[in-house]
Image (cartoon, rainbow, N blue to C red):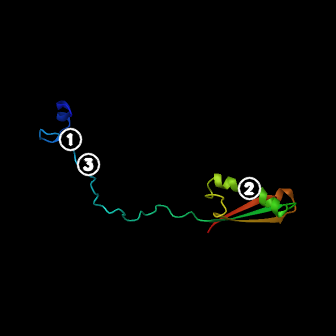
Amino acid sequence: MASNSFRILNPQLYGSSSKSSLPNTKPKRHKAPALGSAVQRKTSSVPSVRLCFTGYRVRPLDPDNFAGSIKDLLDGLRHAELIYGDEWWRISLETKQVKVAHYEEEYTLIEIETE
């Protein structure tokens, strides 16, 4: 049995009658349907990207060595946020090499195209 001071401070539990009554504990049903309308996405899907690395070299590398040498360039593009990621399903990767006559003409050309 609750004290009178508790009953006075919590009238919603006991109502106005002198008898002790407990509140209704049955759950109330929501009027809204359980499944509302679909939530619209705010962003579109991430586009796939085609990357082409062309190495201009006096002494071209073996194809597998040149492909391995672009890893740091690819990671740099990702960290600079020029591409979303370098996962296999996000990018299409192509490597080419061109022989040049002088060391001053050596460079790597990077082409980025969204698909």
User: Disc 1 and disc 3: Cα gap in Å?
Assistant: 11 Å
Q: Position of residue 95 (x, y in %)?
A: 76, 65
Q: Position of residue 66 (x, y in %)?
A: 80, 60
Mark 1 vs mark 2, foreground winner is: 1
Secondary element at tag 2: helix
Tell which residue pokes out farthest to the bottom in this image: 115
Task: Identify residue for label 1.
Answer: 13
Q: Residue at x 76, y 59 (%)?
A: 108
Tell which residue pokes out farthest to the front in this image: 1
Whether residues under marks 1 and 2 lie with C-beta atoms below 8 angstroms apart, the answer is: no
Q: Position of residue 86 (x, y in %)?
A: 66, 58
- The answer to which of marks 1 and 3 sits earlier in the sequence is 1
Task: Identify residue for label 2.
Answer: 71
* Mark 1 surroundings within 10 Å by alpha-carbon count, few (fewer than 14), some (14 through 19), many (20 or more): some
Whether residues under marks 1 and 3 lie with C-beta atoms below 8 angstroms apart, the answer is: no
* Mark 2 surroundings within 10 Å by alpha-carbon count, few (fewer than 14), some (14 through 19), many (20 or more): few
User: For the residue marked with disc 2, what is the amino acid?
Assistant: Lys
Secondary element at tag 3: loop
User: For the residue marked with disc 1, what is the amino acid?
Assistant: Leu
User: For the residue marked with disc 3, what is the amino acid?
Assistant: Thr
**Where is the N terminus found, in terms of image quarters?**
top left
Task: Identify residue for label 3.
Answer: 25
- The answer to which of marks 1 and 2 sits earlier in the sequence is 1
